[in-house]
Image (spheres, rainbow, N blue to C red):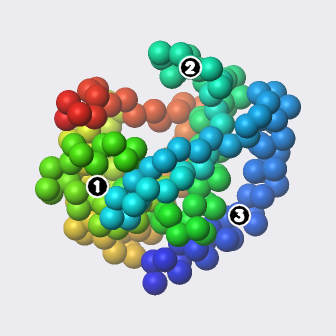
């Protein structure tokens, strides 16, 4: 049922947001050049590796501080979460769900303790319990605890609640023009 709902809603959103996606793609091409999409390996269901897609928001050059690589257009795309729209296609491919723990880099899998590995037992999501409940400054442990709670308590009602909270957080960010960036205070392997 959840997979059917995720795919159905994704198809609806793709058709609804296709003009915006085309405009974003054209703006990236004209302002920042190729490539339009950013792709990265992430760990999905049962730790299986898949390619996550986003609109590119950073320069193609390597700099120590990733934040300094974000382009002017990229900042706008991130503020309005428009860079996340290509992930709707990840749902159609079966890599993601609308709701679930956010997919992390595959190299993080080795740092999970036995309890934290439960987050890999379901499809990751575009949004999740951790994203709508974490504070601005958090730790990996707190984020993973929220993911574990979600896995152990997931239901259609909870998913709808998370989707509604996500929608209202997006509206709030747009209205207040403040990006809700979560800063994790330590590296992943430091817990």
Task: Compute the Cα span from label 1 to label 2.
Answer: 31 Å
Residue 183 x %, y %: 37, 29
Determine the residue positioned at 85% across, 31% down: 30
Task: Compute the Cα span from label 1 to label 3.
Answer: 27 Å
- Judged from the image, the secondary structure of the residue bearing numbered disc 3 is helix
Query: Nearer the N terminus, badge 1 or badge 3?
Result: 3
Residue 22 x %, y %: 81, 50
Q: Which residue is mark 3?
A: 14
Q: Which residue is mark 1?
A: 147
* Number of marks present in the image shown: 3
Residue 187 x %, y %: 28, 28
Label 1 neighbour load within 10 Å: few <14, some 14-19, many 20+: many
- Judged from the image, the secondary structure of the residue bearing numbered disc 1 is helix
Label 2 neighbour load within 10 Å: few <14, some 14-19, many 20+: few
Q: Nearer the viewer, mark 1 or mark 2?
A: 2
Q: Which residue is mark 2?
A: 62
Is residue 137 or residue 7 the one in the foreground? 7
Residue 134 x %, y %: 32, 43
Determine the residue positioned at 48% across, 47% down: 41
């Amino acid at each position: 049922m959840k997979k059917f709902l995720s795919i159905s809603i994704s198809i609806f959103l793709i058709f609804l947001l296709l003009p915006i996606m085309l405009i974003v793609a054209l703006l990236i091409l004209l302002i920042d050049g190729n490539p339009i999409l950013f792709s990265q390996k992430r760990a999905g269901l049962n730790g299986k590796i898949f390619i996550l897609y986003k609109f590119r928001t950073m320069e193609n050059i390597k700099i120590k501080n990733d934040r300094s690589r974000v382009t002017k257009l990229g900042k706008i795309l991130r503020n309005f979460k428009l860079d996340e729209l290509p992930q709707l296609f990840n749902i159609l491919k079966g890599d993601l769900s609308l709701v679930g723990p956010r997919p992390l880099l595959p190299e993080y899998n080795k740092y999970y303790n036995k309890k934290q590995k439960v987050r890999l037992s379901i499809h990751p999501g575009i949004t999740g319990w951790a994203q709508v409940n974490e504070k601005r400054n958090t730790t990996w442990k707190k984020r993973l605890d929220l993911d574990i709670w979600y896995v152990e308590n997931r239901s259609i009602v909870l998913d709808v609640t998370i989707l509604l909270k996500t929608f209202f957080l997006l509206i709030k960010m747009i209205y207040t023009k403040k990006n809700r960036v979560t800063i994790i205070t330590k590296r992943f392997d430091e817990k």
